[in-house]
Amino acid sequence: MVSPTTFANKLGGNRISKDIDFESDNTAVRFSEKYLLNAGDAAGKEAEERMRALFTDEVLAFFASQDKICVEGFYSHLCFYRVRKLIEPEDIPEFMKNGFEMFQLFTQ
């Protein structure tokens, strides 16, 4: 799951599961400052390694350039949304474009 970092989880930490941070370059650091990334129920070093492999430099750059988006994956499903924000009808094409761009990055 990818979700925006909030003031509350900066203060209290992410108690649900471990946040996976990246530090390889400025883009990776910016991603880690803006977002929480965790492997959900799949705990352990192996799950973290799979998440790190999935989040390539291109994926990190995509998220670092976005604001307050969330992505959750479950088996063959991928859900892309914004927290507490309805998408206005006129913004749907751009939002869908962003979602498909993100999907393509994950499937390369």
Image (cartoon, rainbow, N blue to C red):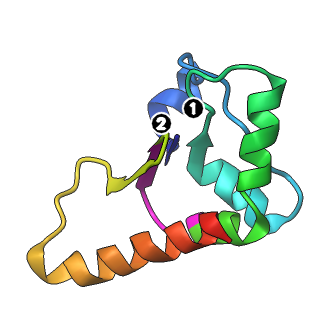
Q: Amino acid at mark 1?
A: Lys
Is residue 69 found inside the magenta-colored segment of the image? yes
User: Residue at left 62%, top 34%?
Assistant: 38
Q: Are discs 1 and 2 less than 8 Å apart at CB?
A: yes
User: Residue at left 78%, top 47%?
Assistant: 52
Q: Amino acid at mark 2?
A: Phe
Q: Could you say whether the residue bearing mark 1 is in a helix, strand or loop?
A: helix
Residue placed most toward the observer, 70 or 32: 70
Is residue 51 found inside the magenta-colored segment of the image? no
Q: Which residue is mark 1?
A: 10
Q: Quadrant of residue 41?
A: top right
User: Residue at left 76%, top 63%?
Assistant: 56
Give the label on residue 7, or none. 2
Mark yes or no: residue 21 visible: no
What's the CA distance linking mark 1 and mark 2?
A: 5 Å
Residue placed most toward the observer, 81 or 11: 81
The location of residue 79, given as percent across then percent down, is 37, 51
Q: Which residues are magenta?
A: 63-73
In this view, the residue farthest toward the top is: 15
